[in-house]
Image: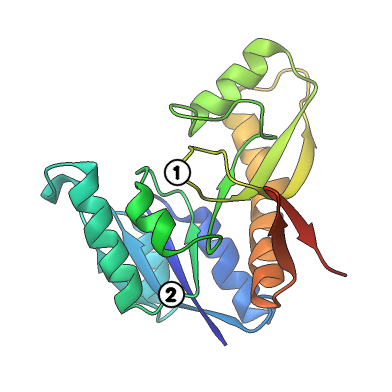
Amino acid sequence: MKNIVVLVSGGGTNLQALIDAEKRGELGGGKITCVISSKPDAYALKRAKDAFIRTKVLERKEFPDIAAYSKAMAELLKECEADLVVYAGFMTILDEQVCGAFPYKMINVHPALIPSFCGKGYYGLRVHEEALKKGVKVTGATVHFVTEECDGGPIILQKAVAVKNGDTPEILQRRVMEEAEWKILPEAVRLFCEDRIKVENGVTIISE
């Protein structure tokens, strides 16, 4: 069994998708053993407690800078014996202290088809606002490994979602979550827990 630690900051809809997938036996032998939040009032913590998952809070504002926060997070993840770290709406960019401690063991879901609409500042509704502003006809979501470069790690899975006439950022955000994020994040976790993902020359190869 692999220990999965999920990092959250907000509502926890992606965490819920993982909890539901685990209940269905779809995480490939992985088990969510801890949920760590950067905010004490994140609703994701209630979702975790309702599912009887251990929770911890590591508040960003309690630390003077990102280096100190990253050091504390790396230590906490080691303490949790994390085999896989999943960003599920986690809004803090951690530095190389964490990435270096868990190389190709940290994954994130991004609400666009990377390399489009990604990088620093592209999160939440802004991603969908920019997609609509650009007039793209297809958007989607990407699960990728977390590296020091924001949204720059090797891509694991992607799923396309149609953009429709009359879409608002909020409507598009919901469709991307329902049709892509909530499907490919648990799938990527399953592939990882089944040891089916390897990285060669910065590109992932998924074995059959």
Q: Mark 2 vs mark 1: which is more N-terminal?
A: 2
Taking the spot 77% from the left edge, 18% from the top edge, the residue there is 165
Q: Which picture quadrant has residue 40?
A: bottom left
Taking the spot 30% from the left edge, 77% from the top edge, the residue there is 79
Q: Where the N terminus falls, by quadrant? A: bottom right
Q: Which picture quadrant has residue 133?
A: top right
**Does dot 1 land on a helix, a strand or a loop?**
loop
Mark 2 or mark 1, whichever is nearer to me:
1
Vertical comparison of 27 with 154: above or below:
below
Tell me where residue 191 appears, x and y as whole percent.
71, 69
Vertical comparison of 44 with 123: above or below:
below
Q: Which picture quadrant has residue 21?
A: bottom right
Give the residue number, with chain letter if any, for mark 2.
Answer: 82
Q: CA distance from mark 2 to mark 1?
A: 19 Å
Q: Residues within 10 Å of mark 2 (few under 14, many from 20)?
A: many
Tell me where residue 208 appears, x and y as whole percent.
88, 70
Q: Which mark is residue 187?
A: none
Left or right: where 188 falls relative to 99 = right
Give the residue number, with chain letter if any, for mark 1.
Answer: 148
Taking the spot 38% from the left edge, 43% from the top edge, the residue there is 91
**Does dot 2 land on a helix, a strand or a loop?**
loop
Taking the spot 40% from the left edge, 81% from the top edge, the residue there is 52
What is the three-letter code of the residue carrying label 1?
A: Glu
Question: Farthest right residue?
Answer: 208
Q: Residues within 10 Å of mark 1 (few under 14, many from 20)?
A: some
Looking at the picture, tell me which residue is in the foreground, 129 or 190: 190
Tell me where residue 153 appears, x and y as whole percent.
58, 45
Vertical comparison of 111 with 49: above or below:
above
What is the three-letter code of the residue carrying label 2?
A: Ala
Q: Can residue 185 be seen from the camera position used here?
A: yes
Looking at the picture, tell me which residue is in the foreground, 138 or 30: 30
